[in-house]
Amino acid sequence: MQKIGSIEVLPNILLAPLAGFTDSAYRRIVKEFSAGIVYTEMISSMGVFYKDKKTLELMRFYEEERPIAAQIFGSIPDKLAYAASVMEDAGFDLVDINMGCPTPKIVKSGAGAALLKDLSLVKDIIKAVRKAIKVPLTIKIRKGFAKKDNVVKEVGKIAEGEGANAIALHGITAEEFFKSDAEDWSSIKTLKKTVKIPVIGNGGIKTEEDVLRMFKETGVDYVMVGRATMGVPYFIKSAFLYITTGEKYTLGLKEKLYIIVRHIKYEVQDKGEERGIREMRKIISHYVKGMKNAARFRERLNGVATEKEMIRLVEEIFSAQGG
Ligand SMILES: Cc1cc2nc3c(=O)[nH]c(=O)nc-3n(C[C@H](O)[C@H](O)[C@H](O)COP(=O)(O)O)c2cc1C
């Protein structure tokens, strides 16, 4: 079986970190089907240092989520090293450093993709974090910061030299943000050719066919999928089935309804009813995408305040589909 450091990873398709989505409930739902590794939402190293309550909540996970990576972000090597050691002590199987987030708030603080503008800092960070933990260390990068940048070779060599165990690459620059036609898988192929440690290809996967194509075109060891799992928590299972047998995995309406109900219950269990229901609104919008009356349903969803009401409303839309 393929490994990242000491961790066996199967299937070779991973769930990407998605802030605001991939909390423990989301990860557990995806994991019921399949995922090689799941990642937490990004966790602030400064928040860990100051023991911020909201930050520490992001560290909660259940045994069935393993193997699970904690993703940390920040720009100060010793703070990241400290946060990494806290993650190791909390029992995470791997630690990942966010070097790719392009959102203005994160970039302004010097973290995320801003790090790609200062490769000596990248080196210092990986060195410091590596020293602080024994569990496998990975980094998640973009192709570069500015549109014209491509730093994958340099960063790849630095990461490998400093003892990182794998690199995840979203083949797009920070300035290109999430522009769908700017995904550049050739940069992923270049990284794969540059380093010996495993490479995790990421970005622009919409279908099972795309997963197969990324493996073929880039030669990566793993593919990481984010948005394609929104509303389709069995996407990774289906994609793995597709690359191994040519078949896809599908679910009937009733099974899909059960998943949503379970997702609501997990969320409320973890975050309490008020917050759980609020956060489920956007998640359910993805689940009902493409369904009959989805737009009207979304409006009604915003008026729902309790778990019971939310489940009843979801049951209603599903029965209106004729299933
Ligand atoms: C809503 C949202 C939240 C994200 N949050 C994170 C994050 O916390 N950490 C991170 O490294 N990347 C984050 N990303 C980037 C994804 O992990 C991934 O690299 C990107 O979406 C491309 O993969 P995809 O096309 O399969 O979604 C986020 C992306 C989205 C859309």
Image (cartoon, rainbow, N blue to C red):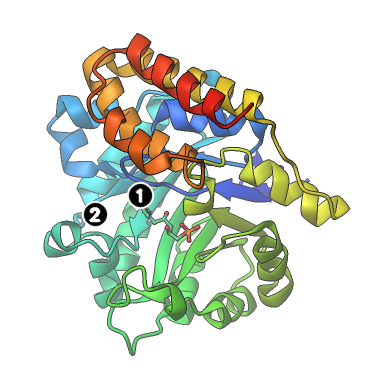
The residue positioned 85% from the left and 55% from the top of the image is: 246
Q: How far apart are marks 1 and 2 (CA)?
A: 7 Å
Q: What residue type is labelled 2?
A: Pro
Question: Is residue 68 shown left or right of residue 150?
Answer: right
Question: Is residue 197 shown left or right of residue 127?
Answer: right
Q: Does the residue labelled 1 lie within 8 Å of ligand 1?
A: no
Task: Please indicate, yes or no, whether residue 129 appears anywhere in the rendered image.
Answer: yes
Tell me whether the residue at label 1 lies in contact with that at label 2, contact meaning CB atoms closer than 8 angstroms.
yes
Picture layout, residue 111 above or below residue 119: above
Q: Is the N terminus in the top left, top right, bottom left or bottom right quadrant?
A: top right
Can you tell which mark lies on residue 157? none
The residue positioned 23% from the left and 68% from the top of the image is: 114
> Which residue is at the front of the view, 238 or 110?
238
- What residue sits right under mark 1 in the picture? 129
Can you tell which mark lies on residue 77? 2
Question: Is residue 29 shown left or right of residue 141?
Answer: right
Q: Residue most toward the bottom?
A: 148
> Which residue is at the front of the view, 121 or 227?
227
Q: Quadrant of residue 95?
A: top left
